[in-house]
Amino acid sequence: MATLTILPSGKTIDVGEGTTILAALLSAGEPIPHKCDGNAKCGSCHIYVQEGRKGVSKIAREENERLDSIVGVGSKSRLACQAKVLGTENIKVELLGFGSGL
């Protein structure tokens, strides 16, 4: 179990191992776009993992390819639908204030 802190709201939730960040955000009632239902096809759930990146699964090829096609991607960028909580450390994510998908 890990604690997920959501910026800019500051809300914190407990998230079980293996849960995607998208599923955790939706279950917490956080508004986050997800046009492709979590299939790494659209990039609309682009977030920044500000802290605890070692507590999130590694980037797979499909996610990396989608991130390469999105404007505003940086070293902290992840797709919430693909990033799974490992339960090894607490995580802080920042929701972006604009639709970053294609």
Image: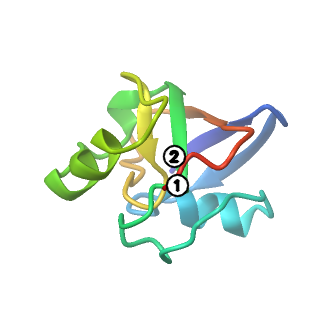
Q: Earlier in the sequence, mark 2 or mark 1?
A: 1
68 or 15: nearer the viewer: 68
Labelled pair 2, 1 in contact (Cβ < 8 Å): no
- Left/right placement of residue 64 relative to residue 20 reads left
On the image, numbered disc 1 is attached to which residue? Answer: 21
Q: Amino acid at mark 2?
A: His
- Determine whether 61 is above or below 35 in the image: above
Counting labels gives 2
- The residue carrying pointer 2 sits among few (fewer than 14), some (14 to 19) or many (20 or more) residues within 10 Å by Cα, namely many
- Give the number of the mark in front: 2 or 1: 2
Q: Position of residue 22 (x, y in %)?
A: 55, 60
- Determine whether 23 is above or below 75 in the image: below
Q: Position of residue 16 (x, y in %)?
A: 50, 59
SS of the residue under disc 1: helix
Q: Amino acid at mark 1?
A: Ile
- Left/right placement of residue 38 relative to residue 31 reads left
On the image, numbered disc 2 is attached to which residue? Answer: 46
Of all residues, the one furthest to the bottom in this rendering is 37
102 or 74: nearer the viewer: 102
- Left/right placement of residue 86 relative to residue 9 reads left
Residue drawn 54% across and 55% down? 45
Residue drawn 19% across and 51% down? 60
SS of the residue under disc 2: strand
Residue drawn 48% across and 56% down? 102
98 or 29: nearer the viewer: 98
